[in-house]
Image (tube, rainbow, N blue to C red):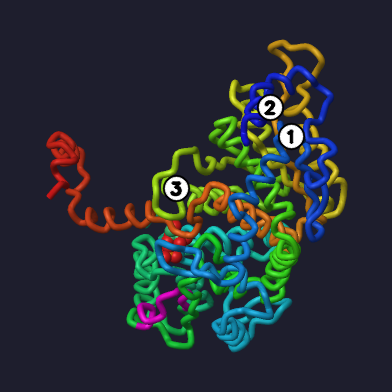
């Protein structure tokens, strides 16, 4: 089946590099269009009509649409943990889990209105890491980009004791809510910070229980920790950390900026969910998944870049890095057998205009291609020519990547022949951000189906957590002398017992 595709591949970069002016994927209808108002142009890729046809056949053979449907229908798709993957239901008003109501009731009881955020607290401190931190923090930064909200949201994750002390000097704890977001409620980094904050409250004679909230899939553990029962939100075990942003993990954001802002984000996600649900096998996220799969397996390209030209979405790349790399960082297939092809890509990225002054040189000129997704907004809340400026830069990069800067091949002109995808949102709103994130979630599921891996477990993360828990407390005082002795004795021998 793949012989013809391999032939295309031989032509690959070289052919495109020498045929400037030709859009390779042009005239392949599913590659340009819009999905629920989110525009996409995947025509700037190194794939012929012939290869594209084969890729589409492969997606059918692999049952990509069926896998997507199994996720949406609540089948136990997460084999190693024997779980469903319920993330889509959290943004579907028709089928949201029962725990949804508790989320709204808690916010209402705190007086959080759609427009004003939380009147009871001036500031929300979210304590969490990974999927329990990236998403709400991304939303908060995206919101701060369009409104001046006096740092209403503070994300506490991986900070030093010095940083924590300094931060606490600037915060009125009595007027601060602390949201401990942890699916497992055992993550070392998070629980340590939560304990430190609890001590701070106690040392100031404040009742920490009134201001602390827990979001977790282990409510019993939060209760055992001492949380007030109606301050504990159950996010359910079936939602994966990196897919959890529309679940109660968004509580800290909603508490800071209001239900309206959070609802608008979720509505954006839902729009794309609905569009994909209409025909998963013909959907734009599947095309996107096929393109990345193509480069990974047939071109053996290890990296992809995601570059947003919306400065307040600066945390988007880190968010998608977890989503894609935890989901696809696998070397066993869905049945537990070792895989024999490359799986998943390294995701790198940065806000567009920063990237241009950093790693875009590599994307333009290096000896290896890095397929790039360039994400732009057609308008910005701060209306002036800002959107035009951003888009001019975005299109300039895409053009230079594909065609190079000039007609001749020399050391001063980028060679061209480098692929990019364009994603264009209507504006820089949270709703648009929701559309983008949902799009990548669906692409991740489709990629998992194409590679035939389970995108919902993360045993590598669990292994690291376990080893760190065993080691902590056994590492000697880190003075130079002790450290030298310690390494001198051989680190592996030292810990083997
Ligand atoms: O990355 C694995 C993971 O367990 C994620 O699900 C989560 O994003 C992160 O670690 C933090 O874990 P928890 O939410 O259990 O504290």
The residue beneath circle 1 is: 50
Q: Position of residue 345 (x, y in %)?
A: 54, 41
Q: Residues within 10 Å of mark 2 (few under 14, many from 20)?
A: some
Residue for point 40% across, 61% down: 80
Q: Position of residue 175 (x, y in %)?
A: 53, 77
**Are the two marked residues, 1 and 2, in contact with CB atoms closer than 8 angstroms?**
yes
**Are the two marked residues, 3 and 2, in contact with CB atoms closer than 8 angstroms?**
no
Of label 1 and label 3, which has the lower sequence position? 1
Mark 1 lies within 8 Å of ligand 1 (Cβ measured): no
Q: Quadrant of the N terminus?
A: top right
Q: Which residues are magenta?
A: 213-223
Specify the label residue 8 is tagged with.
2
Residue for point 57% across, 61% down: 135
Specify the label residue 330 is tagged with.
3
Foreground tag (3 vs 2): 2
- How far apart are labels 1 and 3 at the CA level? 29 Å
Mark 3 lies within 8 Å of ligand 1 (Cβ measured): no
Specify the label residue 482 is tagged with.
none
Q: Residue furthest front?
A: 1
């Amino acid at each position: 089946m793949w012989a013809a595709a391999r032939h295309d591949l031989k032509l690959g970069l070289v052919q495109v590099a020498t045929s400037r002016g030709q859009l390779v994927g042009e005239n392949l209808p599913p590659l340009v269009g819009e999905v629920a108002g989110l525009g996409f142009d995947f025509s700037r890729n190194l794939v012929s009509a012939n290869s594209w046809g084969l890729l589409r056949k492969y997606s059918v053979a692999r049952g990509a649409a069926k896998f997507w449907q199994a996720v949406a229908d609540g089948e136990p798709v997460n084999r190693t943990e024997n779980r469903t993957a319920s993330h889509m239901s959290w943004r579907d008003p028709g089928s949201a889990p029962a725990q949804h109501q508790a989320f709204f009731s808690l916010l209402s009881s705190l007086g959080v209105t759609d427009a004003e955020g939380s009147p009871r607290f001036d500031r929300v401190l979210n304590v969490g890491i990974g999927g329990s931190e990236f998403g709400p923090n991304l939303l908060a930064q995206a919101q701060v980009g369009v409104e001046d909200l006096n740092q209403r949201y503070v994300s506490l994750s991986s900070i030093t004791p010095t940083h924590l002390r300094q931060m606490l000097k600037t915060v009125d704890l009595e007027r601060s809510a602390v949201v401990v977001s942890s699916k497992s409620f055992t993550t070392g980094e998070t629980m340590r910070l939560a304990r430190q904050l609890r001590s701070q409250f106690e040392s100031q004679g404040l009742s920490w229980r009134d201001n602390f909230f827990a979001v977790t899939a282990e409510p019993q553990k939060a209760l055992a920790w001492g949380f007030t029962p109606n301050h504990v939100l159950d996010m359910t075990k079936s939602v994966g950390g990196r897919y959890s942003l529309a679940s109660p993990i968004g509580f800290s954001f909603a508490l800071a900026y209001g239900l309206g802002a959070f609802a608008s984000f979720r509505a954006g996600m839902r729009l794309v969910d609905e569009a994909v649900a209409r025909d998963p096998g013909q959907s734009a996220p599947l095309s996107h998944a096929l393109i990345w799969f193509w480069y990974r397996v047939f071109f053996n390209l290890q990296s992809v870049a995601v570059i947003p030209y919306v400065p307040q979405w600066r945390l988007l790349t880190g968010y998608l890095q977890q989503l894609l790399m935890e989901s696809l960082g696998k070397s066993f297939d869905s049945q537990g057998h070792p895989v024999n092809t490359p799986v998943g890509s390294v995701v790198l990225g940065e806000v567009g205009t920063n990237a241009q002054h950093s790693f875009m040189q590599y994307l333009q000129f290096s000896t290896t291609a890095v397929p790039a997704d360039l994400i732009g907004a057609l308008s910005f809340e701060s209306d002036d020519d800002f959107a035009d400026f951003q888009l001019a830069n975005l299109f300039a990069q895409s053009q230079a990547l594909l065609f190079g800067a000039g007609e001749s091949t020399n050391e001063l002109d980028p060679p061209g022949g480098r692929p990019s995808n364009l994603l264009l949102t209507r504006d820089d709103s949270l709703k648009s951000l929701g559309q983008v994130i949902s799009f990548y979630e669906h692409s991740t599921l489709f990629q998992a189906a194409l590679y035939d891996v389970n995108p919902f477990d993360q045993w590598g993360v669990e292994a690291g957590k376990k080893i760190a828990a065993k080691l902590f407390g056994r590492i000697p005082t880190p003075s130079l002398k002790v450290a030298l002795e310690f390494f001198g004795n051989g680190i592996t021998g030292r810990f083997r017992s």
